[in-house]
């Protein structure tokens, strides 16, 4: 009797479970629910979806950064290289070769300046130099620092020329001059003239 009741009980439980499964799977209710279908898809593709989401986040974050960085590098002017000869070490050297022209400021008188005589200064290098940009071959440009050195240069071709550098301190006074050639082929009618600059000059 006990064996029979046990068998009957087991069959009843088994039958109930089986019937329940068949009823649920067979009625199509779960398949008809949009929310259930979405949930099933997410469970089946959770790993794939996670990887896609992570990859999208990484690419979406990295690409704009790379593009922005490259654009900034392209638009931004390069920083001046460190001076290779600061102070007295630059005296008598070429401002372009030594990198001192990269941050140079200029004093260019606008009146009574036939050959566009100018004085350039690099505070980073601690120097000044003279330059002319509308001269003739044979014209001379000079710069002399009060209590310091003097430099000069001759226009060998073209219209412009600059002197080598003359070192200056935090405060200084310097004189730059333009002197015309005495050659018979000279075209200009101007005479020698000079400009004076100091550390307080309105450099631009």
Image: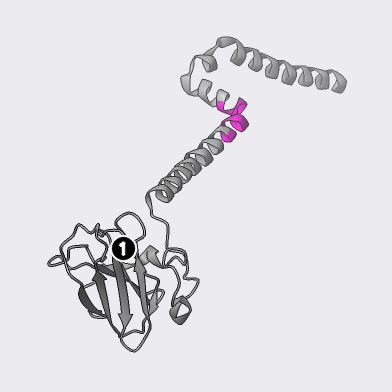
Q: Is residue 122 left or right of residue 189?
A: right
17 left or right of 121 in image: right
Residue range highlighted in magenta: 42-51
Q: Measured from the top left, where is residue 13 in percent x and y?
A: 73, 21
Q: Secondary structure at mark 1?
A: loop
Question: Seen in the image, is 49 located left or right of residue 155?
Answer: right
The percent coordinates of residue 188 (x first, y second) are: 18, 60
Q: Residue at x 21, y 62 (%)?
A: 115
Overall secondary structure of the magenta section = helix
Residue beneath the point at 48% across and 79% down: 89
Callout 1 environment at 10 Å: few (<14), some (14 to 19), or many (20+)? some
Indicate yes or no whether the magenta region holds residue 82. no
Q: Is residue 44 magenta?
A: yes
Q: Residue 78's image quarter?
A: bottom left
Q: Position of residue 8 (x, y in %)?
A: 79, 17
In the depicted structure, whether residue 16 falls above or below residue 53: above
Q: Which residue is mark 1?
A: 138
Q: 42 or 151: nearer the eye?
A: 151
* Residue occupying the far left of the picture: 111
- Which residue lies at the image location 48% right of the left edge and 74% below the top edge? 85
**Residue visible at 85% across and 23% down?**
2
Between residues 124 and 100, which one lies in front from this camera angle? 100
Image quadrant for the C terminus?
Answer: bottom left
Is residue 28 placed above or below 51 in the rendered structure? above
Could one spot residue 90 in this view of the protein? yes
Q: Quadrant of the N terminus?
A: top right
């Amino acid at each position: 009797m006990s064996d029979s009741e046990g068998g009957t009980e087991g069959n009843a439980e088994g039958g109930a479970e089986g019937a329940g499964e068949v009823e649920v799977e067979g009625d199509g209710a779960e398949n008809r629910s949009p929310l259930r279908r979405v949930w099933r898809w997410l469970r089946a593709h959770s790993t794939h979806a996670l990887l896609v989401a992570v990859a999208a986040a990484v690419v979406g974050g990295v690409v704009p950064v790379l593009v922005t960085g490259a654009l900034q590098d392209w638009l931004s002017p390069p920083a001046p290289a460190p001076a290779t000869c600061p102070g007295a070490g630059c005296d008598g050297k070429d401002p372009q070769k030594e990198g001192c022209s990269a941050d140079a400021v200029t004093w260019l008188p606008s009146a009574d300046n036939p050959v566009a005589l100018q004085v350039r200064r690099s505070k980073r290098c601690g120097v000044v130099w003279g330059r002319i940009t509308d001269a003739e071959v044979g014209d001379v440009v000079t710069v002399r620092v009060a209590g310091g050195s003097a430099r000069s240069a001759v226009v060998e071709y073209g219209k412009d020329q600059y002197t080598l550098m003359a070192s200056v301190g935090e405060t200084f006074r310097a004189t730059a001059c333009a002197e015309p050639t005495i050659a018979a082929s000279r075209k200009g009618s101007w005479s020698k003239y000079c400009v004076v600059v100091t550390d307080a000059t309105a450099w631009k």
